[in-house]
Image (cartoon, coloured by chain):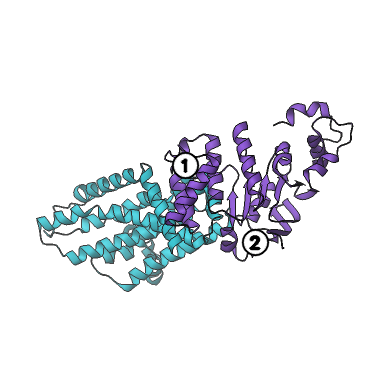
Chain colours: A cyan, B purple
Amino acid sequence: MRKVFTILKRELAGYFATPVAYVFIVIFLLLSGFFTFQLGDFYNDGNGQATLSGFFNWHPWLYLFLIPALSMRLWAEERKQGTIELLMTLPITLPQAVLGKFLAAWLFAGVALALTFPMWITVNYLGDPDNGTIAAGFLGSLLMSGGFLAIGSCVSALTKNQVIAFVLSVSICLVFLMTGFTPVIGIFSGWLPAAVIEAIASFSFLTHFDGLAKGLIEARDLVFFASLIGLALYANTLLLELKKAD
Amino acid sequence: MSATIEIRGLVKHFGPIKAVDGLTFDVSEGEVLGFLGPNGAGKSTTMKMATGFLTPTAGTVRVAGHDVGEDPVAAKSVLGYLPEGAPAYPDMTPLGFLRFIGEIRGLVGGALEQRIAEVVRRVHLEGIMRQPIETLSKGYKRRVGLAQALLHDPKVLIMDEPTDGLDPNQKHEVRSLIHEMGRSKAIVLSTHILEEVEAVCTRAIIITKGRIVFDGKPEELESQAPPSVTKNRLDWVFRKLTGGEKHPEPQLSAVGGRL
């Protein structure tokens, strides 16, 4: 565990040693503000309620591009710099390295998410929202960012090219979003049995995030994100084991 | 006493290419083994397998009694490794980098700072400890890599071209450092520079196409050249053994051999 923490600390310091951290946080906050207020009709949601649903609803789409930008460097950069050879010949196990890097990125995404707290203050100032629902929304958003990150980390282990890692991660995450996106489901609903569609949709981030964003903390949603993260990181470890050197 | 590094029947295939083709040798404490061979002979591949970075196609490596394949963490903790090109995290400072390596290797607090001070003194990193590694010259980067490999005072030291990119003064310093450490450690270093083998190594192994073609003392290596060869005798033997030229002309090798 101490070794995981040492890796985590180095990674996290790495974000702040370069402009990566600041650019990411500023863009994340600007975009989430823009989407919420301009596109999300924050002030006029139709039923006169103070909620943050207009804020959370954009998170899957925001993460789709921002999280792969964060995760693309995780392993691709180690390969490019050759530091993977150094890291893999230190007395640590692969799972420790994978976990340390993932947790650093997740913690960082969590910090970016936590910095949206003025949104919470604003909605409490303007009205009387259900703060339990909002807390569930933040939890859901954090879990979802972990899911995106774990997929991104796994993809990043495949290549030394960060652009390839980014494009592949966005594509895979897009699939995980689209399978639960109502317009897409609509296309298939004509010719696929409902059970199949439901099964496909159950693999979507959107399906599981929607519940949490509405304030419903259900075990199956938590289990979904936890097992997705676990599986992706396990695959990440296997991929590194199989091709450490090139 | 059993050998510190035991390599048995080591084989590595990359697709159809046999990079390493059945290497067996031991290195004991007090030995400085110079690992020689033309480019692509399998030197780096062997070192990568010995340090647990690459998984061998066949064969085993034991470091201080620990099987690298079965107990990699134990083997890696007694081993110091300078990979080819001395990779390091470019956005870190040498100080931050050495602290990271030290913490991973289980050094903490005063012991860590003491070890860092010690290696910094030995490889002369004073004055650049708070500068990002990416801004350092090639020679300094190489020395940061050396410092990293020496930090935990390992029993076994494996270095892939430790003096590459250093100027003659720095080469001299690193060679004396290796020579001094050689008494209490088992050291393997790869090099292209034949004089380096004479200067610091107690033993030389030449491999070509993944096989050992010479294993002995540097003096024995030189004695293989006929008396008619008066200049660059080591070069002559090296090229004869590795098939660089069928009948090497000593006069012509004077320039190339120095590189």
Using residue B178 as the reference point, say whether residue A173 is left or right of it. left
Residue B121 in picture, x, y percent from top left:
51, 42
Closer to the camera, A84 or B241?
B241
- The location of residue B88, given as percent across then percent down, is 51, 45
Quarter location, residue A214? bottom left
Amino acid type indicated by mark 2: Ala
Which quadrant, please, contains the N terminus of chain A?
A: bottom left
- The Cα–Cα distance between marks 2 and 1, rounded to whole angstroms, is 32 Å
Residue, x 10% and y 56% (percent of image)?
A125
Tag shown at residue A207: none
Mark 2 — residue? Answer: B64
* Same-chain check, marks 2 and 1: yes
User: Does residue A98 appear to the left or right of B1 in the view shown?
Assistant: left
Residue in front for this viewpoint, B211 or B133: B133
Answer with left or right where residue B123 lies relative to residue B258: left
Few, some or many C-alpha atoms within 10 Å of disc 2 (few <14, some 14-19, many ≥20)? Answer: many
Q: Chain of mark 1?
A: B
Residue B45, compared with residue A207, is above or below; it is: above
Instruction: Give the foreground label among 2 and 1.
Output: 2
- The kind of secondary structure element at disc 2 is loop
- Few, some or many C-alpha atoms within 10 Å of disc 1 (few <14, some 14-19, many ≥20)? some
Secondary-structure class at tag 1? loop
Residue A240 pos. (x, y %): 54, 57
Task: Return the disc, 2 or 1, that comes first in the chain's sequence.
Answer: 2
Percent of width and height locating residue A74: 45, 51
Circle 1 residue:
B90
Report the amino acid beneath label 1: Pro
**Which subunit holds the residue at mark 2?**
B
Q: Is residue A168 visible?
A: no
